Amino acid sequence: MQTVIVPIDFSDTSLNAARYAVQLLTGHYGVNLILYTLCDKPAQTEEAAQKLEQLKTSLRDAGIVKMEVIAESGSDLITELEKLARHRLADLIIMGITGRNAIGQSLIGSNTLKMVGQKVCPVLIIPAEAGYQDVKNVLLTSDFKSVQSSTPTVPIKKFLKPFHPQLHVMNADTQHYVALTEEYQAEKAWLQESFQEFNPQFYFLGLGDVDEAINQFATDKKIDLIIIVHKEQSIFSKLFVKSHTKKLIYQSTLPVLALHE
C-alpha cells in the first residue's frame, strides 16, 4: 500500500478510525496517510486544516507514519472523496462513523456505506468501539460461487501481504451438513491455490443465520479483521443493509474490509 485516506469530521468515531489507521500502518514504510476533511464553506478550510495539523501531531503518539492533511470545501463528501481517491490512486480508504449526531455515533453512517458502493478502492470500516489489534487472524467470507471471477484476489493480497496473517476462509450454508459437492471442492481448490502464501484454512458451517455464524466464528478463532466481497446477488450482500451491518460490525467491534467483485 502506498496511499491511504482517512476522512475526518472530528467526531469521536472518525478520530478513532484515524488512530486505528496510524497503528495499522506503523512500520510499513512508503505509505502516505492522508487525513481529509470536507468543509461546507471555503472560509472554513483554513481553520479545518489547522485542526487536522493538530490531529496529525497528536497521532504521533499512536505510531510513526508519514501523514499529510487536506481540507477543502464542497457539498458532497462522497463525490469529493471519490475524486481524491482517484486522483491520488488510493489503495485504501479507512472510515469510521462519519455522522455528527447521536444516531451517527451509534450506527455505521450512510456515508461509509455509500463509499463502499463507489467501488473506487477497498474500504476498511472501523466500528466506533474498535480498538487496534495486530492483524494476525483474518476471516474471508465466501459464498463459494464462481470464486475465480468474483474474488478480487489482487487487492485482497495487496492488503494482507504486509501483515502475513493466518487466513480463515468461511462459508455458512444450511446445505453443508455432511459433505461438500464437487463444485464446492473445485471452488475451494482455486482459493487454496490463490491464497497459498497465507496458509488458508477452510470452514463450512451449516448455519442459517450468517451474521450469527460470522460473529461466533470470529470470537472462537480470535479474528482481528473480516473481509467481505460484496456481490449484488450474494447472501453476503445483505450485510450492507443497515440493520445487518450494525449487528456484524458495530456490535462485534471488528474492522471489516469491504471490496467488490
Image (spheres, grey):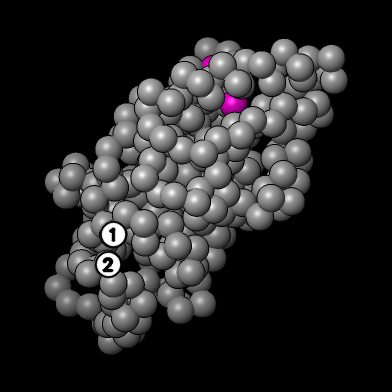
Helix, strand or loop at label 2? It is: helix
Residue beneath disc 2: 198
Amino acid under label 1? His
Instruction: Give above or below for 37 relative to 238.
Output: above
Q: Name the residue at the right extreme.
A: 42
Mark 1 surroundings: few (<14), some (14-19) or many (≥20) residues within 10 A: some
Gap in angstroms between the C-alphas marked 2 and 1: 7 Å
Residue beneath disc 1: 164
Magenta stretch bounds: 7-11
9 is within the stretch colored magenta: yes
Which quadrant holds residue 205?
bottom left
Q: Position of residue 219 (x, y in %)?
A: 19, 42
Q: Is residue 206 left or right of residue 209?
A: left
Which quadrant holds residue 47?
top right
Instruction: Give above or below for 222 relative to 67.
Output: below
Q: Nearer the viewer, mark 2 or mark 1?
A: 1
8 is within the stretch colored magenta: yes
* Main secondary structure found in the magenta portion: loop
Instruction: Give above or below for 40 relative to 248.
Output: above
Amino acid under label 2? Phe
Q: Is residue 248 left or right of residue 40?
A: left
Q: Nearer the viewer, residue 216 or 132?
A: 132
Query: What's the residue at 46%, 79% (across, down)?
Result: 148
Query: What's the residue at 51%, 77% (across, down)?
Result: 149
Query: What's the residue at 46%, 38% (across, down)?
Result: 65
In this rendering, does residue 173 appear at all? no
Circles 2 and 1: CB atoms closer than 8 Å: yes
Q: Which callout, 2 or 1, points at the residue further toward the start of the chain?
A: 1
Query: What's the residue at 61%, 21% (across, down)?
Result: 52
Instruction: Give above or below for 226 relative to 199.
Output: above
